[in-house]
Image: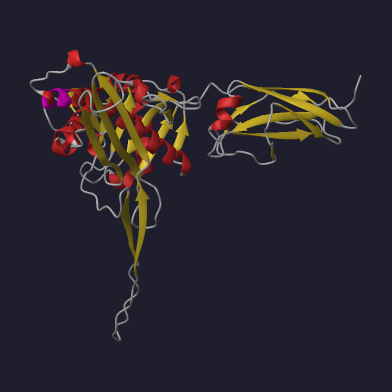
């Protein structure tokens, strides 16, 4: 008979300990969550009204208390199975073999992905709530690193005064600048991030009450990932230079961890023992309890240089018709991630918008992009420019200005 015992229930504390020790984001991992269902828990936002003027003639002013209950659903659901050759199984101690496989998998695969998913979720929340800047790493230096970091922290200033209230993750280059900055007088030391002496080590320091942690593995530090096989930066991902978040409002919530082991002959997957592992977790960014705003995160992103767009114009086969052909380095991949294309035509000139600026598609018309070449009818316009816009409304690529061809030859 198959062995249906869930080993994860036996080793839950140990496995969670490994994840905590092997992740840089361990301060954000929580396990004491009030679950409403198999994958949903609730977060209650409480707000209260303020003081009112007191009347000395007697009486009290009435205020209001508002509780808004919002459910959150865990969505990051992962699984894998391995066929373990008979020769690799210690038949005298099968349980130890299972636990060893679990420990290695959690340490080398699940823990790094936990970090990557955390950074992605925070970055996506920052993008959705305009809590980002797009500044190239090449513009950072030892002379400006302190002032720039302090400017980033101001976006989450209410959490700085609370113990452990704010953590910033930095790329190695920025930590290097900080180590030689004249304005910075604190020590930068190699420390354990987790609670145990065997946990992952990296350079850690603090600035203005904010804990600064160096990111040693840049592969985890992107705004979006493809999880088809492990995790890899998505085609349209931006590298993260600095990510600031408060453990008071940002939580990584593990839900399900299932580990099953089937002896050879009890399954049909091959000649050997079968190991199965499922993990179910997610990271959530909660609003504050005063006005429901997201003010606990801020991210500094590297402008994405992958997006280059060119357009050509040819006679469209009719009066004032032009066939506009778009060529983009990310045309296929970007549309899959919600990127859209917009055009703007003008009689004399179409000024270039600023890529990654807050001003986005004013004056532009969205294209229904089913193929790269499309035919448009123009009147007096003779110039056109095409912009790529991401899912958050930011222009991330812009073409050169092109003359519209409206007559045949």
Q: Residue furthest left?
A: 92
- 130 relative position to 396: left or right: left
Q: Tell me, yes or no, whether the highlighted magenta stretch contains residue 398.
A: no
Q: Quadrant of the N terminus?
A: top left
Rendered residue at 47%/42% (across/down): 128
Rendered residue at 90%/22% (across/down): 408
Count of numbered labels shown in the rendering = 0
Quadrant in which residue 58 is drawn: bottom left
Above or below, 167 against 171 in this view is below
Report the colour scheme. secondary structure
- 172 relative position to 368: left or right: left
Q: Quadrant of the C terminus?
A: top right
Foreground of the two, 228 or 261: 261
Foreground of the two, 177 or 57: 177
Foreground of the two, 116 or 275: 275
Above or below, 128 against 25 in this view is below
Residue 154 in view, yes or no: yes
Rendered residue at 23%/43% (across/down): 30
The magenta stretch spans which residues? 95-100
Query: In the rendering, at what x and y percent does residue 78 appear?
Result: 34, 33
Residue 118 in view, yes or no: no
Query: In the rendering, at what x and y percent does residue 8 appear?
Result: 19, 36
Quadrant in which residue 13 is drawn: top left
Foreground of the two, 236 or 383: 236
Magenta part, dominant SS: helix
Q: Residue furthest top?
A: 87
Quadrant in which residue 345 is drawn: top right
Above or below, 359 against 171 in this view is below
Query: In the rendering, at what x and y percent does residue 309 appear?
Result: 64, 23
Query: In the rendering, at what x and y percent does residue 185 appear?
Result: 23, 26
């Amino acid at each position: 008979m198959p062995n249906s015992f869930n080993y994860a229930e036996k080793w839950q504390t140990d496995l969670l300990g490994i994840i905590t020790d092997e992740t840089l984001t361990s301060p954000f991992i929580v396990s004491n969550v009030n679950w409403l269902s198999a994958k949903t828990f609730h977060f209650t936002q409480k707000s209260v009204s303020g003081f009112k003027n007191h009347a000395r003639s007697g009486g009290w002013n009435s205020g209001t208390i508002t509780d808004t209950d919002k459910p959150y659903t865990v969505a990051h659901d992962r699984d894998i199975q391995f066929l373990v050759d008979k020769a690799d199984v210690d038949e005298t101690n099968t349980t130890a073999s299972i636990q060893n496989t679990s420990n290695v998998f959690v340490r080398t695969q699940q823990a790094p992905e936990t970090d990557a998913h955390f950074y992605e979720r925070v970055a996506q929340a920052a993008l959705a709530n305009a809590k980002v800047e797009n500044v190239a790493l090449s513009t950072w230096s030892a002379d400006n690193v302190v002032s720039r970091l302090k400017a980033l922290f101001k976006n989450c200033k209410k959490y700085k005064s609370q113990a452990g209230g704010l953590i910033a993750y930095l790329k190695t280059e920025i930590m290097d600048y900080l180590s030689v900055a004249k304005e910075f007088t604190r020590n930068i030391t190699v420390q354990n991030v987790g609670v145990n002496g065997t946990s992952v080590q990296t350079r850690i320091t603090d600035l203005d009450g904010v804990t600064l942690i160096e990111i040693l593995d840049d592969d985890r530090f992107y705004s979006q990932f493809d999880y088809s096989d492990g995790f890899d930066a998505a085609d349209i991902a931006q590298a993260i230079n600095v990510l600031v978040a408060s453990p008071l409002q940002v939580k990584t919530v593990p839900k399900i961890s299932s580990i099953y082991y089937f002896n050879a002959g009890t399954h049909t997957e091959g000649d050997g023992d079968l190991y199965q592992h499922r993990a179910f977790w997610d990271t959530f960014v909660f609003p504050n309890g005063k006005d429901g705003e997201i003010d606990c995160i801020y991210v500094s992103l590297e402008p994405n240089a992958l997006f280059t767009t060119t357009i050509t114009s040819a006679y469209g086969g009719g009066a004032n018709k032009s066939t506009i052909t778009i060529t983009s380095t990310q045309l296929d991949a970007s549309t899959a991630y919600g990127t859209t294309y917009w055009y703007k035509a003008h009689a004399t000139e179409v000024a270039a918008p600023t890529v990654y600026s807050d001003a986005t598609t004013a004056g532009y018309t969205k294209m229904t992009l089913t193929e790269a070449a499309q035919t448009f009818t123009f009147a007096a316009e003779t110039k056109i420019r095409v912009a790529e816009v991401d899912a958050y409304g930011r222009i991330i690529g812009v073409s050169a200005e092109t003359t519209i061809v409206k007559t045949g030859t």
